């Protein structure tokens, strides 16, 4: 079997999935077919991943935007563990969990991500000082997006 013959059905399948998602509000799709996992994430710098272990299929990725220089930025990014709406406070009338300059401890709740009507607590993985709230309150964040940056103490 020629590699091109093997790739063609998967490339066509990926193109079909992308076309289906174009008009929808779905931000991420994970699909497993015949032992192959396909992950499609929609966001600026959309990334399509196909596991490289499948014969004849290459991993297709578009690199993410470059971050601050590692020399200048010691901060640790708190990453969204799932796709959902980011909330900086427990309610619209409550103060935010954290603000830039606040000192947090490991395990402290620093935000919420709502997915399918469930509010998921986002906890700081480290003790440190909040450098930046990257996510915008009320906006949908994709799994893997940076929510907050914390500089270790």
Image: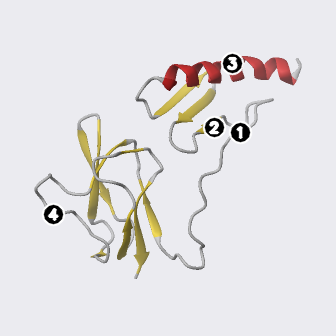
Disc on the earlier residue, 3 or 4: 3
Callout 4: SS: loop
153 shown above or below 124: below
Residue appearing at x 67%, y 42% in the figure: 61
Residue 34 in view here = no
147 vs 17, left or right, is left
Q: Would you call the spot at circle 4 few (<14 residues within 10 Å), some (14-19), or many (20 or more)? A: few
Q: Residue at x 84, y 22 (%)?
A: 4
Residue projecting furthest to the right: 2
Mark closer to the observer (1, 4)? 4
Side of 71 where 144 appears, left or right: left
| Mark 2 to mark 3 CA distance (whole Å) | 14 Å
Per the image, the residue denoted by label 4 is 95
The numbered disc on residue 6 is: none
On the image, the x and y values in percent for residue 125 come to: 39, 65
The residue carrying pointer 1 sits among few (fewer than 14), some (14 to 19) or many (20 or more) residues within 10 Å by Cα, namely few
Image: 47 above or below 7: below
Picture quarter with the C terminus: bottom left
């Amino acid at each position: 079997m020629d590699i091109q013959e093997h790739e063609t059905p998967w490339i066509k399948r990926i193109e079909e999935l992308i076309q289906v998602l174009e008009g929808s509000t779905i931000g991420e799709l994970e699909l497993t077919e015949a032992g192959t996992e396909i992950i499609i994430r929609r966001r600026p710098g959309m990334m399509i991943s196909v596991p490289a272990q499948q014969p004849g299929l290459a991993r297709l990725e578009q690199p993410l935007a470059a971050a601050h220089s590692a020399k200048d930025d010691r901060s640790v990014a708190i990453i969204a563990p799932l796709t959902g709406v980011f909330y900086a406070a427990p309610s619209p009338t409550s103060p935010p969990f954290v603000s830039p300059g606040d000192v947090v401890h490991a395990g402290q709740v620093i935000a919420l991500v709502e997915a399918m009507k469930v509010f998921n607590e986002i906890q700081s993985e480290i003790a440190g000082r909040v450098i930046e709230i990257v996510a915008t309150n009320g906006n949908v964040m994709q799994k893997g997006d940076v929510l907050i940056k914390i500089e270790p103490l």
